[in-house]
Image (cartoon, rainbow, N blue to C red):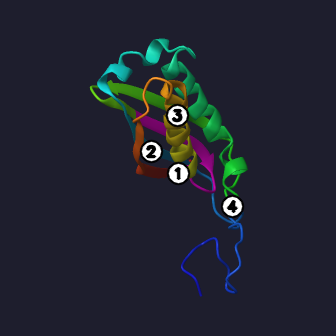
Amino acid sequence: MSDLSHVDESGELRMVDVGAKPAVRRRAVARGRLRTAPETVSRLGSLPKGDALAAARLAGIMAAKRTSDLIPLCHPLALTHVGVELALEADGVAITASAETTAQTGVEMEALVAATVAALTLYDMAKAIDKGMVIEAVQLVEKTKEPV
């Protein structure tokens, strides 16, 4: 018997049946960071490929909406809000992504995917000028649910 919700009694992977659960208001927040050279930070708004910050925000939002296409056992969710905030720091960018819905299952994966894809987008857009960038510390930092 497994303690994992996506594994059945015989050890097979399965999608969790959430049909009997009540829909509740759910919110999740994930954070991550892109560590860069200090001179890279000042150039992120005007790279040869364009504004990396605007692209990363949009990419994170779009990715959250496609989470169930990327992670095999995630339920497709009607998201009511996705936000991606980028804070410039001396040696990189702090990324905070939030996802919200009213549903029978949570939005942790959507928030994590948004933060990760925002970081990947920044990395992609700046890789020509900074070969030493590191994506780090992507983690879930908040998860809430409240009755509707």
Q: Up-down: is 108 above or below 121? A: below
Amino acid type of disc 4?
Leu
Q: Label 2, label 1: how many angstroms apart (C-alpha)? A: 8 Å
Amino acid on which disc 1 is placed: Glu
Q: Amino acid at mark 3?
A: Ala
Asked if residue 103 lies left or right of residue 51, the reply is right
Of label 1 and label 4, which has the lower sequence position?
A: 4
Give the quadrant of residue 82. top right
From the image, tell me which residue sits under label 3. Answer: 118
Mark 2 surroundings: few (<14), some (14-19) or many (≥20) residues within 10 A:
many
- Of badges 3 and 4, the one in the foreground is 3
Residue indicated by mark 1: 108
Circle 2 sits in a helix, a strand or a loop, which is it? strand
Q: Secondary structure at mark 4?
A: loop
Q: First in sequence, mark 4 or 2: give its number.
A: 2
* Residue receiving disc 2: 30
